[in-house]
Image: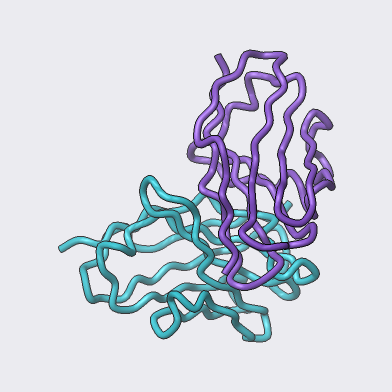
């Protein structure tokens, strides 16, 4: 089973900032990494697939990078609506596993 | 756009069976995998498993033996049953549509439903 270590667990940013969220896999998972955004009481939204591909309809200020074991979700020029819980998922092997999540607060 | 909605009891007694249904709207349940995940309070998400509309399933080994996912194509619904529940099964349960080409990656999710296991 692949363990995903996501960090930080919590972060605070100001509108216009750039933020990075990390997800490290316990073994090589190629580019089989996805990222999601979830706001309280709402359905999770699929934002990055295959580590680097922006899901259609997602603003281009979101981007993903990485391959193998180290992955990063970057949000450029952050906006107040980006306040949410973000989590990573690997689909290289079963069982699918998730990172512990990052709560992003916008000041 | 596909929408998913979980439904079922919010309270289940220990040793009983948790039963949830996910209703899919805005698209057919034929094609795609259909998944369940859960998130215990204060913890990360856990993948439970998925079903293909034909009935093929894939479960998380950590829950093997207790979990059953089924599909009703006539109602555009799929369901989760988890037997012999304990307090450790208290969680928000999510259903999702999942991509066959990406090993069951969820793309559209429901809002989730909290199930508490308590006497």
Q: Residue at x 68, y 19 (%)?
A: A79
Question: Hey, which residue is sitting farthest left in the picture?
Answer: B119
Residue B36 location, x and y as percent? 53, 66
Task: Residue B77: name its quadrant.
Answer: bottom right
Protein image colouring: by chain
Residue A3 location, x and y as percent? 56, 59
Above or below residue A40? Residue B87 is below
Residue B34 location, x and y as percent? 63, 69
Task: Residue A4: name its quadrant.
Answer: bottom right
How many numbered dots are placed on residues in this image? Answer: 0
Q: Where does the N terminus of chain A fall, quadrant-wise?
A: bottom right
Task: Residue A30: name its quadrant.
Answer: bottom right
Q: Which chain is purple?
A: A
Q: Residue at x 59, y 45 (%)?
A: A87
Q: Give the side of residue A79 with respect to residue B38, left or right.
A: right
Q: Give the side of residue A61 with respect to residue B55, left or right.
A: right
Task: Give the colour in which the image draws chain B.
Answer: cyan
Q: Nearer the viewer, residue B43 or B74?
A: B43
Q: Nearer the viewer, residue B85 or A6?
A: A6
Q: Where does the C terminus of chain A fall, quadrant-wise?
A: top right
Residue A16 location, x and y as percent? 72, 14
Q: Nearer the viewer, residue B82 or A31?
A: A31
Q: Residue at x 50, y 55 (%)?
A: B45
Above or below residue B68? Residue A24 is above
């Amino acid at each position: 089973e692949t363990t995903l270590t996501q960090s930080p667990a919590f972060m605070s940013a100001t509108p216009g900032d750039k933020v990075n969220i990390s997800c490290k896999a316990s073994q090589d998972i190629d580019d089989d990494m996805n990222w999601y955004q979830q706001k309280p009481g709402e359905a999770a939204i699929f934002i990055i697939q295959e580590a680097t591909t922006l899901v259609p309809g997602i603003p281009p200020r979101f981007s993903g990078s990485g391959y193998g074991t180290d992955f990063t979700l970057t949000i450029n020029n952050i906006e107040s609506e980006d306040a949410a819980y973000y989590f990573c998922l690997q689909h290289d092997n079963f069982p699918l596993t998730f990172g512990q999540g990052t709560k992003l607060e916008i000041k | 756009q596909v929408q998913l909605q979980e439904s079922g009891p919010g309270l289940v007694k220990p040793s009983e069976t948790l039963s949830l249904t996910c209703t899919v709207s805005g698209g057919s349940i034929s094609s795609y995998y259909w998944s369940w995940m859960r998130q215990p309070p204060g913890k990360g998400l856990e993948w439970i498993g998925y079903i293909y509309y034909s009935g093929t399933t894939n479960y998380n080994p950590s829950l093997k033996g207790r979990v059953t996912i089924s599909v009703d194509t006539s109602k555009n619904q799929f369901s989760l049953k988890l037997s012999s529940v304990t307090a450790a099964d208290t969680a928000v349960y999510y259903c999702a549509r999942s991509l066959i080409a990406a090993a069951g990656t969820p793309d559209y999710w429901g809002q989730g439903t909290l199930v508490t296991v308590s006497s």
